[in-house]
Image (spheres, helix red, strand yellow):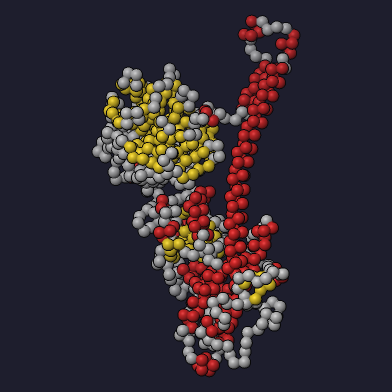
Amino acid sequence: MGAGRKTQTFTTPHPQDLVPYGANMRNLRKNHLGGVIFGCNKLTMEECLLKQLFGLPAAHFLHVKNISPGLPLFLFNYSDRKLHGIYEAASHGQMNINPYGWTTDGSEKTQFPAQVQIRVRLQCQPLLESQFKPIIVDNYYNQHHFWFELDHAQTSKLVSLLASVVVTPSTLVRQNTLKWRKNLQALPSDDRIEESEGLEPLTSEAKHVNHSSSNWDATVFFGSNNSFKHQKDVKEAEQVEQELIYMKLKELALKSNLKNEGQDLSLSGNVEDRAVSNELTLEDTDNPREQLGFEEKRGESPPSLSEQKSGESPCSLSVQKSGESPQSFSDNWAIIAKLVQEVEELKAFKAEQSMKIGYLEHKLEQAAMEIKHLKVCLKLESEPTPSMLESEPTPSMLESEPTPSMVHIDEKVAESCDLLPPDPNESMYLVGGYDGDSWLLALDAYYPYQDMIKSLRPMTSVRSYASVAQLNGDLYVIGGGNSHLWYDTVESYCPATDEWKLGPSLREKKGSLAAATTHNKIFAMGGGNGVDCFSDVEMLDLDVGRWIRTQSMLQKRFALAAVELNGVLYATGGYDGHSYLKSVDRFDPREHSWTKIASMDSNRGCHSLVVLNGKIYALGGFDGSAMVPSVEIYDPRLGSWMPGEPMNHCRGYSAAAVVKDAIYVIGGVKDGDSIAETVECYKEGQGWREMTTRAISQRCFMSAIAFSI
């Protein structure tokens, strides 16, 4: 192991037992963290929103500390199991921003010290668990509990879903009206109101409204429950509400104007009064005060629009531009919603174009490097050395040591060769796995000839024990898990655009399965879910657009290995729930049946299988008692297995692929259950050699496949 590198050991090769971190968190790295869900109940939710502060128990600080300002946040209410949002972080995640938060009288320390300050990004209707669970289903580690860390894909889907049920200002008015009406049912008679002295209605609510426009959602859901004791104070509270509505309408109108002009949509809060002219009406009734359950005091009437002083709040739910006829608020909201949708479509189009431009720029850069290399080569060819100008080379000159000028030219040639971009056909993909510290969603291109690794766009979810296959130029990553859950999901990667997309899901959740492509279809074979081992085989037919169950293998096989050779599939070894196997099943799609062929000499599971020069190589694995370095070779022309030269190290759960007539075996679990960080290379006639590499670090439970165009 490299100096200072953390080593993770395992006591068993069974993946369902490998849980190196706590079950209450995913441990996403900071650059993979797309958002965080915080928890509350009906008693603590009010404080969360009024104080603009979210908190979790101290154990969650491992991911709360990765929160930066602007990160999307969500609030899950355990009492009704609804998800609220959309919020965003207004500070970095810290410990004890408020050491006494969510306590009754501040006499004891908080139970939720992992805290972050928040602000409202967009007020939306809460989501039922049945609505948001499909998006974060991979986070559920039992029926009712899930991890709070969200990756970027999950966050994006939650934001989109919540944005589709955004709360409009008219909805807020109706909610507040109903709330006030309910509170006013308990008011004393008019006579008693006239006799009572001034008491404070909705004092805390009004204070929070005036503090900041970002607090407005909290006052809608959590107002004071104190009784109203004077009509004047009721009017004052209503005035606060009207001012709040007016402020929001002005912001929305400004956003609408800015969207039409292609300007910045950020809300500055400094809206010119001349941008819109307003009048105050409540649409539900001609007399809003009668709707709220009380009458105007005798001799008083609400001021008309012309009588309002400059700076006073107008009294309207409609927005009217100067020179235009009045429009209802619903009409304006429809226009604004349409503009928002158009802006989002423009953003998506811009992102797509940027991605395409980036890809073309990459191609242009490669072409420029090749041109530069060719220019150097042409220049070197056209510039003879001084000795070449003086005389023709003699045999003695050819056998002599190179001159300094020759050495200088060789250095130029070597330097120019380094400028060439790596050939994709000399690479392999490394997918997911475990690096000793965390489970990975990484996709890397490994170039063994240059000892270089290039990080590509990561998957949308952490995957290990998955299988990979290539079809129509795209890479498919199938099933697998994250050490706690098994997946039925499938992702496909397009190298041309560096993009991932979700494919049709498997019929069952499974990991440690095998996959291979033949006759333009992908076959997913065997695997298990930590409880059962499977003999099932599923076939992905892109014309149908789903996985179809096809002929099962002759035995259950978990942690098997499979390859395609000459259009025929071979499934080897694995674990059947009782013992590790040496048997081999063969499937010919033309016959549509599995047949048993000659068995290997050794039991093997979690091994690798590759094809080199028309022969199948079974590499390493676990024989039921230990990891082994042995290699067996199957020649279909002879119909039998023969022993091959063993590898230098025992290893299983490694990744292997063939690149330019050489087998490369990367990482895996070594003898002694430590993670390997070495690469071994095999060529026919040359045997195995351990490569010196700086690109590969310790990694296991990953998948690999050679790149092919």
Q: Indicate whether 272 appears above or below 607.
A: below
Image quarter in which the N terminus is found: top left
Residue plotted at (43% across, 35% down)? 469
Q: Looking at this rendering, what residue extends furthest in the front direction?
A: 325
Query: Which residue is at the front of the view, 577 or 404?
Result: 577
Describe residue 588's horizontal placement relative to residue 150 as left or right: left
Q: Indicate whether 91 appears above or below 198.
A: above
Residue 568: x and y in percent read: 36, 27
Describe residue 670's horizontal placement relative to residue 368 as left or right: left
Residue plotted at (65% across, 76% down)? 279
Could you tell me if residue 538 is visible in this image? yes
Residue plotted at (36% across, 25% down)? 631
Describe residue 115's horizontal placement relative to residue 348 as left or right: left
Q: Indicate whether 118 appears above or below 4.
A: below
Residue 650: x and y in percent read: 37, 30
Could you tell me if residue 676 is visible in this image? no
Residue 651: x and y in percent read: 38, 32
Residue 2: x and y in percent read: 47, 36
Q: Looking at this rendering, what residue extends furthest in the left direction?
A: 578
Quadrant in the picture for residue 344? bottom right
Q: Indicate whether 645 appears above or below 505.
A: above
Quadrant in the picture for residue 525? top left
Query: Which residue is at the front of the view, 166 or 324?
Result: 324
Residue plotted at (53% across, 37% down)? 495
Query: Which residue is at the front of the view, 489 or 385?
Result: 489
